[in-house]
Amino acid sequence: MKKHNFNAGPSILPRVAIENAAKAILDFEGSGLSLLEISHRTKDFEAVNNEAMALFRELLNIPDNYKILFLGGGASTQFFEVPYNFLEKKAGYVNTGVWAKKAIKEAKNFGEVQVLASSEDKNFTYIPKGYAIPTDLDYLHITTNNTIYGTEYHTDIDSPVPVIADMSSDILSRPVDVSKYGMIYGGAQKNIGPAGVTFVIVREDLLGKVSRPLPSMVDYRNHIANDSMFNTPPVFAIYVVKETLKWLKSIGGVKEIQKRNRAKAELLYDAIDNSKVFVGTAVKEDRSLMNVCFVMQEKYADLAPEFLEFAKGKGMVGIKGHRLVGGFRASIYNALPIESVQALVDCMREFEKIHVK
């Protein structure tokens, strides 16, 4: 039975990236050594690292005054590394869910934090808008896509202060004007690679402004000076990132993947909106194109466990909603084909026919 991978992360990767990584594990570039056992100081791996950075720059149209880093530690590590490097007096944060709250908590260890807006009043089912951004902030932090609640920013915001964005779950899913951001970061395990590597895109002139001493590993300037090799980088994960970005370029880049992502999301949201059994949870204008969250309509709430088993029997993997919100979540990241979304829609409609007479 064919499996349809809707896992929220680690998540589906392009098949070609997996196959090429598998080959490299057995024999990297004809070296007779596994990718897992080579030195990161070899010219062959330096070429991998450089190609991954070049592809990232090309695909996202990253200006020359921004540096690209591949680090360890996950996006959660950036929750404290960001304020360590940028928060001198005061920072603004927008609270749109669990990950934003974690970032806010860490930032409070380094200075004053103003929560400029929050959607917690409605269980994070919308993206706050129309809030004032004070001009005396060191930066404004946002989380562009919220995997748990299924909301997403669909445009770049205009801000009088540098914007720092956690784009873990929607990076390279749509065009972004990088020049509107001071820094973009995220874990790779949604759209660009496996767990184990974190990407950072940072405007270099913003660094070195805080008065506090920075531990060597936290100071982005050290990683920039060493092309992400200040310490041993996540070699395997970076290789898979490179292969995933090659795949993205081969299919037409970010504009093409945005077109595909919109088609997938429209297909699934249309099925939800026209269902007598299922209902969406996020405000329509803020619905995520990456994580589609939905629940049973109230009169059918008791059928939720039965639907999960039914869907599992049809090959659906990873559609159980996050433990904080329940219901269902279909993560439809870049590498997920529209055929899998159609299979889920067919599964939902078949289940509905059984229970709605």
Image (cartoon, rainbow, N blue to C red):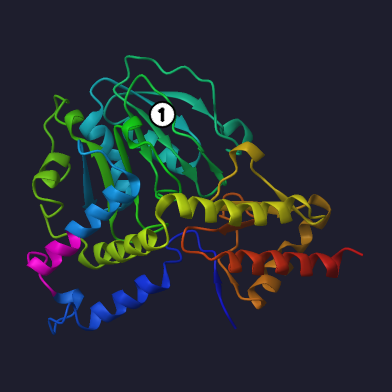
In the picture shown, does residue 220 fall above or below 4?
above
Q: Name the residue at 66% across, 56% down.
A: 267
Please tell me in which quadrant of the rendered image residue 194 appears.
bottom left
Name the one closer to the observer, 321 or 278.
278
Q: Name the residue at 14% across, 28% down.
A: 212
76 sits to left or right of 65? right
Residue type, numbered disc 1: Tyr
Q: Name the residue at 60% across, 43% down.
A: 287
Name the one closer to the observer, 315 or 265.
265
Instruction: Please provide percent x and percent y for residue 236.
Output: 24, 68
In the picture shown, does residue 314 fall above or below 131?
below
Instruction: Please provide percent x and percent y for residue 121.
Output: 60, 31
Please tell me in which quadrant of the rendered image residue 43 appears.
bottom left
Instruction: Please provide percent x and percent y for residue 240.
Output: 30, 66
Name the one closer to the observer, 228 or 14.
14
Which quarter of the image is occupied by the N terminus?
bottom right
Residue 212 belongs to magenta span: no
Please tell me in which quadrant of the rendered image residue 24 appears.
bottom left
Count of numbered circles on the image? 1
Q: Name the element at disc 1.
A: strand
Residue 43 belongs to magenta span: yes
| Residue 206 seen in the figure | yes
Instruction: Please provide percent x and percent y for residue 62.
Output: 28, 42
- Return the residue at label 1: 93
Q: Which residues are magenta?
A: 38-49
Outermost residue, right side? 357
Mark 1 Cα-neighbour bin, 10 Å: few <14, some 14–19, many ≥20: many
| Residue 283 seen in the figure | no
In the picture shown, does residue 130 fall above or below 46?
above
